[in-house]
Amino acid sequence: MRGCFATDSFPPVNFLQNHVEALIFCSPQPVRPADIVQCLSEMFGAEVPREDVDAAIAGLIEKYQSDEHTFGVYAIAEGYQFLTKPAYQASIGILLKQSAKKRLSTAALETVAIIAYKQPITKTEVEQIRGVNCDYAIQKLLDKELVEIKGKAETVGRPLLYGTSRKFMEYFGIQSLRDLPQPKDFATVENEINPEIAAPALENFQPEGDEPATEQD
């Protein structure tokens, strides 16, 4: 290792990697390298170099590439998380279906697609694009923590501004918003987001195993 850990008195090289592995494993959500650095630096009472953490993560990714492991370390939502491998998608999909986990409704998908591409955006602007009231859809997205309030607009009444959350990226399995389908692929002539086209494109990122969409969700 490098930095403050490049000493003969420090434990073996895989010692740091084991701690990084434990942090990623125990977290219910993707862990950012910066958070790992902060945590380990506090524990060791000395600064842990970011490059050492990156090297440890790279080592873990390589370690779990073997077919003997059914899961691995994957980059997602600006962090890293243990996820099962695609080869086991079918059996996991059946389990998820049995748990009756519902997928987002068409209305919610259209709403979150508009927010994802137009953020930060007000509820009124979302409704102007969809052409219908979006109170229920936005509230459901807030409840699922897929969107969050980003502030207030500098307009009359100071309406709330909405944007996507880190959980949105986690839910759709993307590393950043740059991984979303490109608007040019489904933009109208006026270069506006068409929710009826954008929603199905976004739906391609849905986790496998979800139940068919219902308007109640």
Image (cartoon, helix red, strand yellow):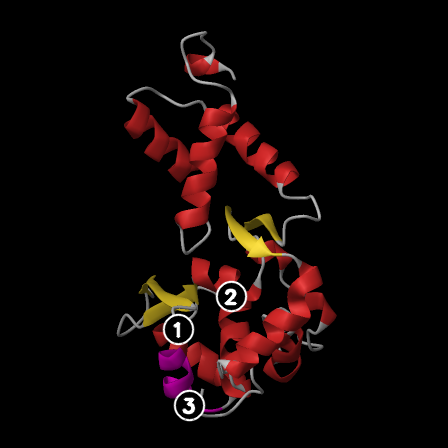
Magenta highlight: main SS? helix
Q: Which residues are magenta?
A: 132-140
**Marks 1 and 2: in contact by CB < 8 Å?**
yes
- Ranked by sequence position, the earlier of labels 2 and 1 is 1
Side of 181 relative to 176 (left or right)? right
Q: To which residue does mark 2 refer? A: 171
Which residue type carries mark 3?
Asn
Q: Residues within 10 Å of mark 1 (few under 14, many from 20)?
A: some
**Based on the displayed image, in which of its 4 quarters is residue 60 positioned?**
top right
**Left or right of 184 in this view: 142:** left
Residue 155: x and y, percent?
32, 69
Q: Which mark is residue 133?
A: 3
Foreground pick, 184 / 99: 99
Instruction: Identify whether 51 is placed above or below 175.
Output: above
* Residue identified by numbered label 1: 144
In space, the residues marked 2 and 1 are separated at their CA atoms by 10 Å
Residue placed at 71% from the left, 67% from the top?
Answer: 184
Q: Position of residue 81 (x, y in %)?
A: 51, 50
Dot 2 and dot 3 residues touching (CB under 8 Å): no
Q: Is residue 204 left or right of residue 52?
A: right
Of the image marks 2 and 3, the number of the one nearer the N terminus: 3
